[in-house]
Amino acid sequence: MHRREAWVPSRLLDVHPGPTDAINLFQTHNLPANTELDKIRYLTLSHVWGQVHPMKLTTANIANLERGIELNNLPRKFQDVVKVARRLRIRYLWIDSLCIIQDSPEDWSHEASMMEKVYRQGICNISACNGEDSSASLFSTRNPRSGRPLVFTQKYLNCSVRFTLIPDWVTLTRTWAKLYFRAWVLQERLLSPRIIHFADFLAWECYTSLATETYSENLKPHRLGFPSLPESERDLVTSEKVSGYISHAARWWDLVQKYTNSKLTYQGDKLVAISGLAEAFSKVIQQPYFAGIWGGDEIILSLLWFTFGETSRPTKYRAPSWSWASVEGAVLNYLDSTISQSLVHVVSITTKPQHGDVYGQVQGGQLALKGFLIEIQNFSERLRTVIAADIACRFDDKDEAGSGPIIFVPFATTKTQYFPEKNEPDFSGIYVQHEEHDGSDPSRRQVFRRIGCGHFSKGGDGCILDLDQWAKLLKLSEPETYGEDFIIV
């Protein structure tokens, strides 16, 4: 169960639950010294910014917002949230666009690093699931009868059976609501201790329950074991154990898959928009964090991520090539495999945070390895003949591979839990190319950038490796002793 700390965000909106129609922004550092911070309750709002950006806090209007703003001067969605706060008798409200100075990079960076606390310390999150932007209402016009369970009786030869079909509005909302296509919202949704989904049919989540207008987790059908009924997601990030995952790393990669299937307006936000989740998850996994990758025992498997669907590299540097955050598009990692034999040794892994926050933006990073480099001749021609080419080689960006040689770096022989009896070894690794440089520094000849990931189980015809390379691969062992040193950036 989550316990609130004696902490509040830098700014909150005071909605004044009295007769006034005005709200005002206030700086929490002005609170009296004897204020019991853990007693201050505030709601958070998750909403779609859309093409028409919401009212924003800027250096020019901060004084005006502190003096107060009439309710009817707020966008419709913000007006509705204020009404909800007043009905719930919760005095304070946190809205990102009005509590972060949007034209101050320094304030934005500082407040972005606080997202884990902002949402975890809020009393409840209001999720505005519908609407294109803040001009839309928080509330929906609907026929309440359309959400009721469907009940019918089926007659058989010697009996009748009464069936009740319960509409699964929660899964529909999580999957298709416009709000949940926003990448930023994943951490808002999973970090908040309580959440009200304002969709066509309301849903409530907390640590102990999930309930809609038609059912809750405490209903008898759920106790009898209907796994298709959705459950609360409150424990997904912060619990020590969550059923269905073989490891903490597997749980993290499920979060990454959800996150990379969502959309970001600004490419540079890739690591920032999941930094709150990473900070919260660090208390569970208890390993160092490197631009989306966790250190520890499963680092080799974690580096074997691969892309899915249309992917590309961002126009500006965002993360090292070995990090999934260095690509645009969906990313997967099957951590249902186990390593039979490691073929690479991680000497070190480092990143350079841009603003001092290890969970936020980075401006550099490198992965130092000892392992084996297998240069593949006539790569394009061999790839055309490969059986299951999409598994043997998945490029991070299909247009990225340059004219230079392509090198396979075997990471491990692996076994999957789905085929434990398989005798033939499966090899997993990544593809790299030499990092471009002017040639003045000879030491950089062993510096590479990742361009893809591959898995295969045989050599010769139908494989990316020829028979000689396959024979060499089968003999590899003890990378710490026989491997060569190189760096991936």
Image (cartoon, rainbow, N blue to C red):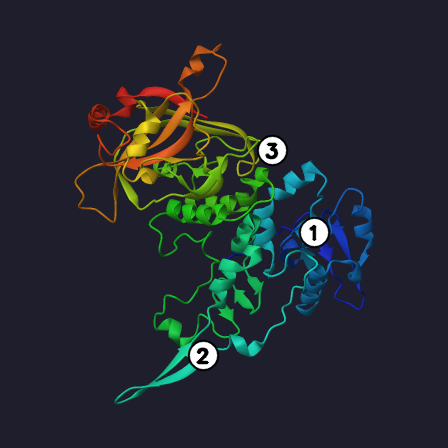
Q: Which residue is mark 1?
A: 52
The x, y position of residue 216, in whole percent, is 47, 72
Q: Is residue 185 above or below residue 348?
A: below
Query: Marks 3 and 1, Cα distance to the nearest angstrom?
Result: 29 Å
Q: Which residue is mark 3?
A: 355
The x, y position of residue 246, in whole percent, is 33, 50
Disc 3 residue type? His
Question: Can residue 65 be seen in this snapshot?
Answer: yes
* Disc 1 secondary structure class: loop
Disc 1 residue type? Val
Closest to the camera, between mark 2 and mark 3, is 2
Q: Earlier in the sequence, mark 2 or mark 3?
A: 2
Disc 2 residue type? Leu
Query: Marks 1 and 2, Cα distance to the nearest angstrom?
Result: 40 Å
Q: Earlier in the sequence, mark 1 or mark 2?
A: 1
Q: Residues within 10 Å of mark 2 (few under 14, many from 20)?
A: few
Relative depth, front residue between 70 and 242? 70
Q: Earlier in the sequence, mark 3 or mark 1?
A: 1
Q: Residues within 10 Å of mark 1 (few under 14, many from 20)?
A: few
Relative depth, front residue between 226 and 140? 140
The x, y position of residue 168, in whole percent, is 46, 68
Q: Which residue is mark 2?
A: 150
